[in-house]
Image (cartoon, rainbow, N blue to C red):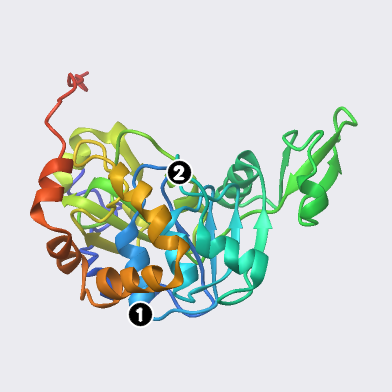
Amino acid sequence: MLGAETAPNLRVMIDKRCSMKEAIANTVQDGSSVYIEGFTHLICFAAGHEIMRQGRKDLTAIRLTPDLIYDQMIQAGCIKKMVYGWAGNPGVGSLHAFRKAVEKGLPHVLEIEEYSHFGMVSRIQAGAAKLPFWPLKNYAGSQIPEANPAIRQVTCPFTGEKLAAVAPLEPDVVILHCQRADQDGNAQGWGLFGTQKESAFAAKKVVVVAEEIVNTSVIRSDPNRTLVPGFLVSHVVHEPWGCHPSFVQGHYDRDNDFYVKWDEISRDEKTYDAYLDEFVFSCADRKAYVKKMGTELFDKLRAKSRLCAGVDYGF
């Protein structure tokens, strides 16, 4: 019997590692639909900043809960349309560039397509399963369908019940941050998840960004932690601290002070643009951003080790 290493049908491992600059240049084009995943946890700010530095325009930005990074991309003129379930500065308040764009058309008009959280999850699940729509009961008694004509109605062929239906989401690019990945893009994570797995299967291209690149033997030794298989992934980026001010379980904490301070910074056009100039456009990459933020901050946020008990995969 052939071993795994010599089996004739075994997929060849590919080294997909590249810089963030290369990954964005090769996947995100003007007019692309882009999904930077993350649900409070694992939000890849580094990818958003690189999209801004490369001056991408007319993007359709997709996410269940767009927060600061999408607001920054709106202010920078990258986003034409947002497809989302809820938008805000978590635990603090509004997204001020988002509100100005929607309410006043400043600095430009922003198209919006709003769903509930579960409506967005349903769209992503439909995209992942390659289905033409996904039925749900989530909008019973809701006014969201009145504001969004893309939410349709279907009749259940078994019960005759009237159900809401949403179309699949199939983003051009999904960007996922994780704790560790191998060079082929097999990505592993733990902690609070959003729709990382579903969005990867729905996407046309997947960029995996990891705090740590490990040997494939590490991935294979703990297979249940694999969120995304490498065969879905086109680019792998090693980007420590890539989620700040968001957090990565086991690596660094959420920078809550940043989120609070951001409310004041983002209320005023001058302070907003000054921040982007200093911490996005004048930084060549994430390493420059981390250096500018200072070691004292990152030492404070760095996670203390707290190992969980291992599991025995023997048989």
In the depicted structure, whether residue 112 falls above or below residue 126? below
Q: Is residue 4 left or right of residue 166?
A: left
- Who comes first in sequence, dot 2 or dot 1? 1
Closer to the eye: label 2 or 1 = 2
Q: Residue at x 20, y 36 (%)?
A: 250
Name the residue that disc number 1 marks: 54
Q: Quadrant of the C terminus?
A: top left
Q: For residue 249, what is the image quadrant? A: top left
Q: Is residue 36 left or right of residue 238?
A: right
Name the residue that disc number 2 marks: 92
In the depicted structure, whether residue 188 falls above or below residue 210? above
Q: Label 2 to label 1, Cα distance in Å?
A: 29 Å
Q: Residue at x 55, y 62 (%)?
A: 98
Image location (x, y in percent) of residue 20: 26, 68
Label 2 neighbourhood size at 10 Å, few (<14), some (14-19), many (20+)? Answer: few
In the depicted structure, whether residue 88 falls above or below residue 61? above
Residues 304 and 274: in front is 274
Q: Residue at x 90, y 31 (%)?
A: 160
Asked whether residue 3 appears in the rendered view, the answer is no
